[in-house]
Image (spheres, rainbow, N blue to C red):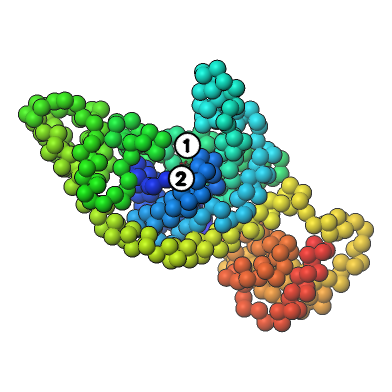
């Protein structure tokens, strides 16, 4: 439980390309393999709605990005891999964060500001074609991150501002309601922060200059042949600086390989030959994954099952944490009012939760009935906070929470109906 939590998402708005692979998919899979990290990787389909209004494209992109991540070696047993829209606690948290985020802060978000500046420049209404979704983008992203209290968020440079905003949201919430959130930090892959595209600008869907990650070999070859170069002839020395081809090569090659290409540049390699070298190098890394990808993409039912299991795993955390946050802001059962009102006598006759610490240092709780008979016994939690979250969830959701928390509870000895009835009593009185 003391491990570092990594979290990152990819917006499901198109076909994954080499830039996504080098900047996000590959580093996230690598990070997930390290010891002592806990990783959360997700398909940001709510974010996709901000840019895309073609339902079929969103669905297709979700399938392609999920398959890419899995083909690149993400192990869903090891990480929590889910689709944003399967975790309803995320939009719920978005609202709580909306209420602690200054409108002026959102006015300064790059994507929104760019849209407004463009309109102003064209002498249009500043907010023409700007949706409230675009404006709220950073808050939804803040909820993605804070929902799981991620410490580290691997992203491209263009996302740093969003992570800073998420930190601010965490701090303002904590300031008002007590310590609930960890302020997250951006992790930038320096070497690959900007993979150039075919035209030399940053590889991006919006520039239409991408190389699809799993383009068939022949298509990959054609696309690589289309990367911009200068007009130097074979035999003329060439500059590695500013060469898109060289930069892409570097993102795939070892140091020795890169040094060798650099030498070939100064020796005057023909552009056609350099492109062949790049093509073969990319294909060497991608080809084995391409096989796995095709297999997955033809089996959407399997991917769907993986995502559903991932959502259940994500919600094991999100549901009790959301219960804690709701309570913190005052979205509470009215029974809470009764518990501070002068009706103490009735309370003594109720079942109750008892929290305690075991000699192994773990925190446990049990539910006992009014006579002190054991109804439910938890396994060990690393912190009193986690045990408290599980209790909050049982109080809020009753019997359904038993299933969600099954892995953290001893097998029940008491009759399930008795436990259910006790929880129902507490749901009113807690
Ligand atoms: N905004 C990110 C992008 O477009 C995707 C994203 C959504 C994300 N939620 C996130 C990234 C949370 C990291 C953490 O690249």
Residue at (59, 23) in percent of width and height: 126
Residue at (56, 39) in percent of width and height: 137
Residue at (35, 41) in percent of width and height: 19
- Would you place residue 353 above or below residue 98 in this image? below
- Would you place residue 208 above or below residue 57 in this image? above
Instruction: Please state which of residues 189 and 129 is positioned toward the viewer in this rendering.
Output: 129
Q: Residue 298 appears at what percent x and percent y?
A: 37, 62
Q: Residues within 10 Å of mark 2 (few under 14, many from 20)?
A: many
Q: Residues within 10 Å of mark 1 (few under 14, many from 20)?
A: some
Q: Secondary structure at mark 1?
A: helix
Q: Residue 369 appears at what percent x and percent y?
A: 79, 75
Cα distance in 3D space between marks 2 and 1: 16 Å
- Residue 27 visible to the viewer: no
Q: Please report contact status of discs 2 and 1: CB closer than 8 Å, yes or no.
A: no
Which-is-in-front pick, marks 2 and 1? 2
Horizontal relation, residue 89 to residue 241: left or right: right
Q: How many marks?
A: 2
Instruction: Please state which of residues 101 and 365 is positioned toward the viewer in this rendering.
Output: 101
Q: Residue 1 appears at what percent x and percent y?
A: 53, 58
Q: Secondary structure at mark 2?
A: loop
Residue at (45, 59) in percent of width and height: 79
Horizontal relation, residue 229 to residue 119: left or right: left
Horizontal relation, residue 240 to residue 425: left or right: left
Q: Which residue is mark 1?
A: 159
Q: Residue 174 appears at what percent x and percent y?
A: 66, 42
Ligand 1 near label 1 (Cβ, under 8 Å)? yes
Q: Which residue is mark 2?
A: 13
- For residue 338, what is the image quadrant? bottom right
């Amino acid at each position: 439980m003391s491990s570092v939590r990594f979290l990152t998402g990819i917006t499901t708005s198109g076909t994954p390309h080499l830039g996504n692979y080098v900047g996000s998919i590959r580093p996230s899979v690598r990070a997930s393999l390290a010891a002592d990290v806990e990783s959360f990787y997700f398909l940001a389909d709510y974010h996709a709605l901000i840019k895309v209004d073609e339902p079929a494209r969103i669905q297709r992109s979700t399938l392609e990005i999920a398959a890419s991540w899995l083909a690149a070696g993400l192990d869903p047993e090891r990480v929590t891999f889910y689709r944003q829209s399967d975790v309803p606690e995320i939009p719920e948290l978005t609202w709580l964060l909306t209420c602690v985020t200054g409108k002026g802060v959102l006015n300064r978000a790059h994507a929104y500001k760019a849209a407004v500046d463009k309109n102003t420049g064209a002498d249009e209404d500043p907010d023409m074609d700007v949706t409230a979704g675009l404006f709220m983008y950073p808050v939804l992203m803040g909820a993605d991150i804070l929902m799981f209290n991620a410490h580290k968020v691997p992203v491209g440079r263009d996302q740093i501002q969003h992570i800073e905003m998420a930190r601010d949201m965490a701090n303002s919430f904590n300031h008002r309601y007590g310590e609930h959130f960890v302020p997250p930090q951006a992790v930038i892959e320096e070497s690959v922060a900007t993979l150039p595209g075919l035209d030399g600008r940053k590889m991006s869907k919006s520039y239409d200059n991408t190389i699809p990650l799993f383009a068939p070999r022949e298509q990959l070859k054609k696309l690589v042949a289309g990367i911009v170069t200068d007009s130097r002839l074979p035999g003329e020395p060439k500059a590695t600086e500013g060469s898109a081809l060289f930069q892409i090569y570097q993102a795939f090659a070892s140091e020795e390989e890169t040094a060798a290409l650099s030498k070939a540049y100064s020796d005057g390699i023909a552009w056609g030959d350099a492109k062949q070298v790049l093509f073969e190098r990319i294909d060497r890394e991608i080809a084995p994954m391409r096989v796995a990808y095709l297999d997955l993409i033809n089996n959407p039912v399997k991917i769907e099952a993986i995502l559903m299991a991932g959502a259940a795993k994500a919600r094991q955390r999100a549901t009790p944490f959301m219960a804690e946050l709701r309570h913190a802001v005052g979205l509470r059962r009215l029974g809470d009012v009764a518990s501070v009102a002068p009706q103490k006598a009735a309370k003594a006759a109720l079942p109750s939760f008892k929290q305690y610490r075991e000699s192994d240092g773990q925190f446990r709780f049990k539910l006992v009935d009014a006579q002190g008979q054991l109804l439910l016994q938890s396994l060990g939690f690393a912190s009193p906070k986690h045990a408290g979250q599980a209790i909050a969830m049982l109080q809020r959701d009753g019997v359904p929470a038993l299933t969600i928390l099954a892995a953290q509870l001893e097998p029940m000895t008491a009759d399930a109906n008795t436990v259910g009835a006790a929880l129902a009593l507490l749901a009113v009185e807690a």
